[in-house]
Amino acid sequence: MEYTQLGRTGLKVSRLVLGTMNFGPQTDEPTSHAIMDAALDAGVNFFDTANVYGWGEDKGRTEEIIGSWFAQGGGRRDKTVIATKVYGNMGGGDGERWPNHDKLSAVNIRRAVDASLKRLRTDHIDLYQFHHIDRRTPFEEIWQAIDVLIQQGKILYAGSSNFPGYKIAQANEAAARRGMVGLVSEQCLYNLAERRAEMEVIPAAEEYGLGVIPWSPLHGGLLGGVLKKEGRSGRSASGRSADALAVTSVRAQVQAYEDLLDKHGLEPGEAALAWLLTRPGVTGPIVGPRTPEQLESALRAVELELTEEVLTGLDEIFPGPGPSPEAFAW
């Protein structure tokens, strides 16, 4: 496994991030534990989760599964950089009846951290991420709450997720005024088929020294060999992939992508991950395996070196928007 610094920090993290969103809803606890053991054995030390994972009435379940894995001992917690998130409503009902159990107010951040620590069975969170922007809470309040948590030793670093470029700038300028480190990472939707982050989010992250952590690196399975799988099994794609493939131009694009990789003897999912590892500012993509076999496939991407011919071909099939303002102006 290769390692890199998380943004401008001294923290060393693996170039693949283990996403845990499937733990609970789609993957049972024993299998989840087996996947985490296999990831750690392979050198993956960066695990990502969120307080809302488990979803619905099972919100928090994913953190509990990770906590029970930590509790098995064997140095699991000490070897792991654990990242979780705050924003979604964790109350017992809808947002109207639990108005202070979501978003980024100081009261919710304080409550949410303590609840996550309890579920994770740990005394600190390495990377505490804001899952979404909060249009109502000023950054001065957010950073005051984070500063207290850092002083208490409950969190070490703060990161963002799904932030536009201007909010990354606002957040870190507000932190600088308080003499704080500010955001050290941004977790955003970024893959070959969805490159809008290259316009402003990634440049802002690079300017402020944030490590970029792409989520949905296979774009909901679209980049994982979906057409090849259709041909083998006769089963149609589902979810985000099915919606995308319903557009004729997208299907043609994906076909060209799979043909290019087939020509070079490459597996689509592994190539899509390897492409992200070549991108400026990227710390590592999040992979969310449902099975140990899917984890093994993702691990191979770290060792995969794409030739210039392949990289050029991928850019021709999935051209990026280009930097701003040239992407939309002159």
Image (cartoon, rainbow, N blue to C red):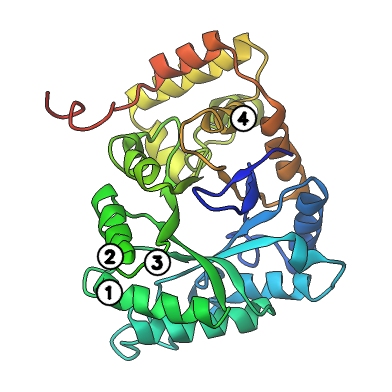
Residue 297 found in image quarter: top right
Distance between mark 3 and mark 1 Cα atoms: 11 Å
- Packing grade of label 3 (10 A; few <14, some 14-19, many >=20) is some
Percent position of residue 94, x then y: 35, 84
Between discs 1 and 2, the one toward the N terminus: 1
Percent position of residue 207, x then y: 35, 42
Left or right of residue 140, residue 232 in this image: right
Please state which amino acid type lies under the numbered disc 2.
Ala
Farthest residue in the left direction? 330
Distance between mark 1 and mark 2 Cα atoms: 6 Å
Is any part of residue 159 visible from this angle? yes
Residue for point 78% across, 53% down? 40
- Packing grade of label 2 (10 A; few <14, some 14-19, many >=20) is some
Query: On the rendered image, what quadrant is the C terminus found in?
Result: top left
Q: Which residue is mark 3?
A: 180
Residue for point 24% across, 73% down? 138
Percent position of residue 256, x then y: 47, 15
Please state which amino acid type lies under the numbered disc 1.
Glu
Distance between mark 3 and mark 2 Cα atoms: 9 Å
Between discs 3 and 1, the one toward the N terminus: 1
Label 1 SS: helix
Q: Nearer the viewer, residue 322 or 224?
A: 322
Label 4 SS: helix
Q: Is residue 195 above or below residue 133?
A: above
Q: Which residue is mark 1?
A: 140
Is any part of residue 133 visible from this angle? no
Count of marks, rendered view = 4
- Packing grade of label 4 (10 A; few <14, some 14-19, many >=20) is few
Q: Nearer the viewer, residue 178 or 5?
A: 178
Q: Do the residues under discs 3 and 4 have CB atoms within 8 angstroms?
A: no
Q: Do the residues under discs 1 and 2 have CB atoms within 8 angstroms?
A: yes
